[in-house]
Image (cartoon, rainbow, N blue to C red):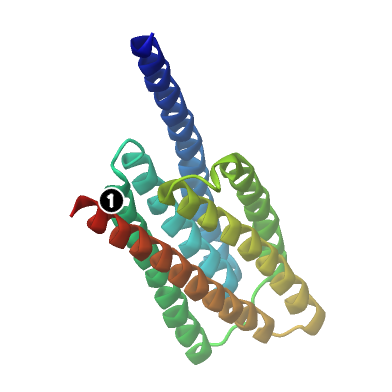
Amino acid sequence: MSDCCGCGKTIDVKAMQAGQRRVLLIVLVINAATFLMMVAAAVYSHSSALLSGALDNLGDALTYALSLAVIAASPLAKARVALFKGLLILAAAGAVAVQMAWRLAHPALPLFEGMGVAGLLNLGMNAVCLYLLTPFRNGDINLSSAWECARNDIYEGMAVIVAAALVWLFGAGWPDLLIAAALLVLFLRSALRVLRGAWQELRQGVHAAG
């Protein structure tokens, strides 16, 4: 009887991991495709907010790839990967800051039409990713950090649309930089949250191993 129960648990774990792999693969493909679309739109529209969103999508694609790689790994390995994810988000924030500085030195009026269309497409794709990852939001550090990225994407998508509307309303480029600055703060807060959670998991794993 105990053997049967053990087999049942093994099957359940494998089924759960298969479901996680399927979801992560889908959101990985979505974010990779959205990244390419956002980069093209950012170049076309001269938008810092769009480029910030594109960098976020690239970071998310890398994050989901890492999450996919460690689904069956130990909690300690997942914590280490989560730590790396936090550093990726931090790197994205740094890239946004550099791009904002470049835009300040080379001002240009963004094209709100391109920003709006790209923002709406981005928000729709991000909503799909969040919906797929929400059932795993309270799981292990691996999936919860992936959900954190997807939630940030919703804020980022809405922010880009707001930036496009404000650029149209005021006929100026400052709303684009303002929204990019707000996204920068969001990325920094998210990075700190993921890094803090990963550090706690690492400490617990090291203590348990000792």
Q: Position of residue 206 (x, y in %)?
A: 23, 57
Which element is circle 1 on?
helix
Q: Which residue is mark 1?
A: 76
Q: Position of residue 52 (x, y in %)?
A: 52, 69
Give the residue furthest to the bottom. Answer: 105
Q: Please, is residue 188 above or below residue 124 in the view?
A: below
Q: Quadrant of the N terminus?
A: top left
Q: Please, is residue 46 above or below residue 38 in the view?
A: below
Q: Position of residue 195 (x, y in %)?
A: 39, 67
Give the residue furthest to the front. Answer: 1
Q: Which residue occupies 52% across, 77% down?
A: 184
Give the residue furthest to the right. Answer: 169
Q: Please, is residue 102 above or below residue 139 in the view?
A: below
Please say whether residue 166 is visible from this viewpoint. Answer: yes
Please say whether residue 36 is visible from this viewpoint. Answer: no
Q: Please, is residue 20 above or below residue 177 in the view?
A: above
Residue 174 shown left or right of residue 166 in the figure: left
Q: Quadrant of residue 25?
A: top left
Q: Amino acid at mark 1?
A: Leu
162 or 127, nearer to the observer: 127
Q: Which residue occupies 32% across, 41% down?
A: 69
- How many marks can you see? 1
Q: Which residue occupies 55% across, 48% down?
A: 137
Q: Position of residue 26 (x, y in %)?
A: 50, 37
Q: Which residue occupies 67% across, 69% down?
A: 159
66 or 55, nearer to the observer: 66
Within 10 Å of disc 1 (Cα), the crowding (few <14, some 14-19, many 20+) is some
33 or 22, nearer to the observer: 22
